[in-house]
Amino acid sequence: MASDVRADIVVVGGINTDFLVQGSRLPGPGEHAEGHLFLEGLGGKGANGAVGAARLGARVALVGRVGMDARGRALLEQLEGEGVDTGAVVRDPGATTGVSLEMVDEEGGTQSLGAPGANRRLTRDDVLRAEERISLARVLLVQLEVPLEAVSAAVHIARAAGLRVVLDPAPARELSEDLLEAVHVIRPNADEARVLTGVDVVDRTSARRAAENLLRRGVGAAVVAAPGGSLVLSSEGELWLPDRRVELADTTGAGDAFSAALAVAFSEGKTLAEAARFAHEASALATMRLGAFGGLPTRDQVESRLARLGPVALSPDGARM
């Protein structure tokens, strides 16, 4: 896709081929279980974030790496077909395109195993070559499937240019204070919050403790996914968004959809409460179809859900309004 149109959102992150098998149950250690459905398609948190934002109406550019193999070429074609600018995606002759093997049971439970391949070879120089793309955008969305030096370079370019920075800290790892202080909004799930803060997130109260820890370390706002809902916390107040009752198919892409929708809402000037509510509904929709890529919702789908719900706001005393 041509890069002469300024992006609203730049995503720096992983690009994979996803192979997904669904069965009635997940296998135990050393056990073979038979599945009944197989899907192959675009994956990786960077690619999912980019497509998720594009489907919600944003102009999106992606920074990442794929191999010179046929899978890498096919993924670029898929991304371009979704309207994503791939001009800053490097074709790596020395590595294969990343791959993720996903298993899903009929209750939506998952197991996964991945080989990151070219994703782990994204460099600071790759990001610096995309500096103009990043600087001209409104929001930077980053994840942790690529090396931290690349993530850090992108974040600091974005902050210097006045962008809002959204971090989806997956896969889970410890992060430096320097990086956290440059993040406007972080969106960890319960496992990621535990790695970052040491807090076992089991409910709203423990999610608040984890979010408070992240704010003390310099993050502007935290959206912590907990059993039962998501806790939004900033200096302006708190908001609890309870999980929606949906026909659950696969939770794999829920976090990707949430982060993509947050980035889109921020690029449109929405408040934190508005952005979190928009993202919460996008995330719920993403769990209703198999596969992270296939489940990413469109703008019409999200707005249709929002139209049936009333407004919410951050509350300074921690109560939902």
Image: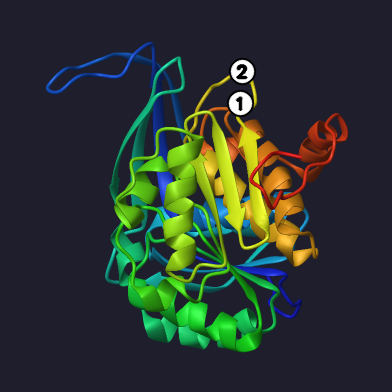
Measured in 3D between alpha carbons, the distance from the residue under mark 1 to the one under mark 2, in whole angstroms, is: 6 Å
As helix, strand or loop, the secondary structure at mark 2 comes to: loop
Q: Residues within 10 Å of mark 1 (few under 14, many from 20)?
A: many
Image location (x, y in percent) of residue 71 = 42, 53
The structure residue drawn at horizontal position 51% and vertical position 34%, both measured from the top left corner, is 291
The structure residue drawn at horizontal position 50% and vertical position 87%, both measured from the top left corner, is 129
Which residue is disc 2 drawn over? 247
Which residue is disc 1 drawn over? 288
- Amino acid carrying label 1: it is Met
Above or below, 296 against 12 in this view is above
Above or below, 87 against 83 in this view is below
Q: Are marks 1 and 2 in contact (CB under 8 Å)?
A: yes
**Numbered label attached to residue 320:** none
Q: Does residue 133 appear to the left or right of 301 in the view shown?
A: left
> Is residue 262 at least partly visible in the picture?
yes
Image location (x, y in percent) of residue 161 = 64, 87
- Amino acid carrying label 2: it is Glu
